[in-house]
Amino acid sequence: MAATGNADTNVGHGALIEAVDRALTTHGRAVLTGCAGSGKTEVARAVAAAAARRRETVLHLAPEAADREIPEAAAAALLASVPRTALDRLAGPQRTAIALLRREADAPRAGRDHVALRLAVVEVLRGLTVPGPVLLVLDNAQWLDPESTDLLRFVLRLTPPRVRVLAAECVQSAPVAESLCGPGTPVVHVPALGADEVAELLLRHGLPARLAGRIHQASGGNPRLALALGHSLAEAAGQGGGAHHADTLPVTGQAREVARRLLAAAPGRTRPTLLLAALAARPTTALLRRAGRPEAEAELAQAERAALVTVAEDGTVAFTAGALPAALAADAGWPERAAGHAALAAAVDDPVQAVRHRALAVDTPDADLAAEITRAADACRRRGQRALAAELGLLAAERTPAALPQEELARLVGAAEDAGWAGRADLARRATRAVLARDASPAQRVRARLAVIDAAGQALADLDETIAHAVADAAGDPSLQAAVQLRIAWKHNIGDGDPVRARDAAAEAGALAKAGGDQVAEAMALTVRARMGRILGDPDAEDILAEALALPAPEVPLGMRNAPQFLAVRHALFDDRLTDARRQLLVLLPAVQRTGSAEDVFEVLRSMTEAELRRGRCVRGTAHARRALELTIEAGLSPGPAWYVAATAEAAAGSFARAAAYARRGIRASEEEGDQVFLSRGLYALGTVELATGEAARAVATLSRVAALEEAQQVVDPSVLRWHGELAEALVAADAPGEAAGLLDRVTPVARSLGRTTVLAALDRARGLCLSARGEPERAVALLEATAERFGGFGLPLERGRTLLALARVERRRRRRAPARAALRAAAELFEAAGAGPWLDLARENAPESCGPHPGVAALTEAEARLALLVAGGASNQEAAAKLFLSVKTVEARLTRIYQKLDVRSRAQLATALRGQ
């Protein structure tokens, strides 16, 4: 009678557990519903564990599917879990009825006193309430046998209020739990996990968090299926399948079994209709009817009740989990799949899809069909549907007769390159393996291998062998050598974090491209040189970029993100020329959408997010960030950059807590992929959130990691990633103004020599706080007021608002409440106009009215105030040291200064002084 599935899937269910507890406290009964594998059992166990900690008696009943066929099996199991002493107090007939049931659960029912049995169970439960409340947890209520269901329905009507009942059941089954608990019982539904919660689930089980988006899409947020997919992926990677870069997740082994169990919830007659929907690219009820399923609506309605599909008002059909159509197709035999594709080929109205289905309905070579598929792939390429073009290219190669080996090779190479554009690493590797297994020319091998590199996104760390083979095959062909050297330059930057080697490789690529007469590759090489030059603080970087922009700019085969036109936009963003950047991005966005390069579209959306957030258009920026994240999940791109973008958007306009969660996820993904560039950015996003939320010691630690990474990458230009001012502010807040001043003294001359005016303003904000902490409040106020005005002139409202917050803190320490209030009010107006919710909340929380009654509190530094609040709240010196990442000796010294400033002599007096904080 064990519950099915014992994986720890209790992630993201804290609010559900609280809701169940409230229902049990208020009503004494609660029903928990959800799909199979949704985590109902884990929620029920958590509720039971909490009751046990309160020393309540907990009875747990979890029937399995087979138990439904055994009369009174659940009743016998329930009584078997009851202590013997509870049965000894029963009257004779009741004790006899229970003894008979416990000894002979499968015996004929004749001769049993069922009234005595029911009354006996009532008395047992009443007796258990004498020492305290009883919680009866009934998991898998759908598997109760009918006799036990009747018995429990009778018993639960007569039990006292001290017997509380939690019944959990699967939504795909006929409802039982509510009839047991009575009408009006609160029902708590266990929803699917979000992508964030799937990431947490994977982390908890030691699986790659960077796959969270893909696994969330494939699992539909079902925890059991998500874990099964993750483990299937790990097994495939362990067998050398390269699945760690997969875009189509393997629905094999445990994952397929979980998917089969979910599919079994729908009646068998729905299976043919579901299979057709699984085979179709864009299934609708009308399409399924035309394909030979006249009862499609009714059958899909049954599948929808089983939580397998959703059907929109326009008839569009979508599976609730991407693994379900894969499992349906895998379990169907070839004749069934072929018949389905043939029916769909005659029913679809898209010529490309008709060709695709006709190709999948046969498995024999056909030169005419292969040529037709190739033309369909060309059409997809023109539409920007590069992933579909890659799939069709592979199909065309498979249908090409053996007598046409060169046509087959050309189709395979084209499929690989389309997959590289689309970021589909699985298709690129599949096509490349086929190319390498044939008598391909060196040029064809190079092109295929370059497609694998292009499809890898940020995960370039493990491609050394692929690059080495490409170098060898490209020998003697300057154009191919240039293309390989460009990829080497990108790898040096992203995977190795070495802009010097990246610049040198780009210079070599440029020389080779010029020798080969490839002006497009030459422009790409100059672009990399300009990008690395900007990072390294090279004053010639803009001239190199201008040289690249002067070259002809046809359609860029290596991606717009690597073109000089896009780098010009990035430089405009670095310089806070935001209106220019936005105008150029609006021109680039439709262009990259036409090319079908998911990474190009993502990069443009990322840049649009940054531009809008810096301009104080937070709602627009958040919308772009959301699209970038959705695209990353749909296309299977490296998630580290998308989670960084989501973190910045959340920090500006959503929630600091969500921003920190996204940043941590991005850090983990970038570490897994060896992406040094976005590892720095993820840490930067986390550090700024920690600084904003008052976790100064954590912010110092996080931003110091950024400093170390940037130093290792030899980054000179402070406008590329603006961590310097943030770290200086964190050091001031952590009571280390001397270190902050040293950092500012080192970076300010660099920013000034490069003409980075908005960077200098951010450094001045940190310097103002530093001056205040070192006892120069007048100079601090003057500098912060001037800096706020400069940010206003630059058109950076969020930066101006942050500077006004800093000014308010300094004025408050000077006990100048009116100027502090005015600065906070002005900051709040800026944040409200920009839609910067978290910062608006911060401005309101820091209002002078909330500072407490003691006039000396304003004299404390932020670091001292944090320690004072902890100690006043009862923390020992050791506990405060651990919380603030300080030594005990530092805590003692700082506490002495706090006592002197507030004129108190004990912790009790300190608590009184801080009352109201």
Image: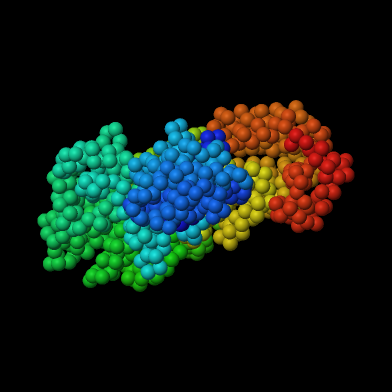
> What colour scheme does the image use?
rainbow
Quadrant of res 412: bottom left
Q: Is residue 97 left or right of residue 837?
A: left
Numbered-mark total: 0
Quadrant of res 464: bottom left
x, y percentage for residue 90? 53, 48
Where's the C terminus, which quadrant? Answer: top right
Quadrant of res 152: top left
Q: Nearer the viewer, residue 410 or 227?
A: 227
Q: Give the residue displayed 53% in from the left and 51% down from the top.
A: 87
Q: Nearer the viewer, residue 384 or 511?
A: 384
x, y percentage for residue 681? 54, 51
Where's the N terminus, which quadrant? Answer: bottom left
Q: Residue furthest front?
A: 92
x, y percentage for residue 691? 65, 45
Q: Nearer the viewer, residue 70 or 463?
A: 70
Q: Give the residue displayed 30% in from the left and 50% down from the top.
A: 264
**Residue 444 position (above or below residue 13):** below
x, y percentage for residue 571? 50, 46
Q: Nearer the viewer, residue 775 or 324?
A: 324
Q: Is residue 272 left or right of residue 706?
A: left
Q: Give the residue displayed 33% in from the left and 57% down from the top.
A: 256
Query: Quick check: can you spot residue 712?
Result: yes
Q: Give the residue displayed 39% in from the left and 65% down from the top.
A: 235
Query: Quick check: can you spot residue 539?
Result: no
